[in-house]
Amino acid sequence: MISNERQSPFRQPYRRPYSQQQTPRPFVQEDTLKVEQVQIERKSFLLMLKENPRGRLLRISEEVGGKRNAIIIPATGLIDFKRALDEMVRADNEIPPKANSPATK
C-alpha cells in the first residue's frame, strides 16, 4: 500500500457546522406580473416582476451554458437600483473608453 492511500487518523472529513447545513426551502407561490427579455450581444437577460406573500420582487436572470444565474431585488429597492443603474449609464456616456477597449475597435 502506498503511504498516501492510507487514511490519516488525524484527518476528519469536512462537515458543515449544524448552523450552516442546507435545509430545503419550502415552496413559495409566486405570481408573475410582467416579463421582459433583453438580448445584448450574445447574452440574454430575463426580467420578471413577481409577487409572493412577502411582497413584490424583480428577478433578473441570465442563462449561460444551461445554467441560470439570477439576482433578486425586492420592490422596495427598485428605485435605488434604477438610480444606481442610471448613474452607470451616465458614467459610461461621460467617461471615454480606453484606447485598447473593444468599444474603440
Image (spheres, rainbow, N blue to C red):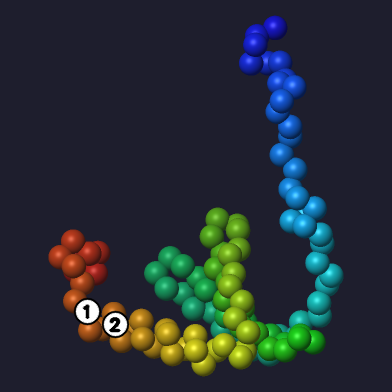
Mark 1 residue type? Ile
Q: Going by the picture, which residue comes out furthest to the front? A: 10
Question: Considering depth in this image, is 66 or 8 the residue closer to the camera?
Answer: 8
Residue at 63% x, 84% y is: 74
Q: Quadrant of residue 83?
A: bottom left
SS state under label 2: helix
* Category of crowding for the residue at label 2, using alpha-carbon neighbours closer than 10 angstroms: few (below 14), some (14–19), many (at least 20): few
Question: Relative to 2, is 86 on the left or the right?
Answer: left
Q: Position of residue 34 (x, y in %)?
A: 64, 89
Mark 2 residue type? Ala
Dot label at residue 43: none
Image marks 2 and 1: residues in contact by CB distance under 8 Å: yes
Q: Position of residue 86 (x, y in %)?
A: 39, 88
Tag 2 residue: 91
Q: Position of residue 85 (x, y in %)?
A: 42, 84
Dot label at residue 95: 1
Question: Relative to 43, is 36 on the left or the right?
Answer: right
Total numbered labels placed on residues in the image: 2
Q: Position of residue 53 (x, y in %)?
A: 79, 87
Q: Quadrant of residue 73?
A: bottom right
**Rounded to the nearest whole Å, what is the CA distance between mark 2 and mark 1?**
6 Å
Q: Quadrant of residue 65?
A: bottom right
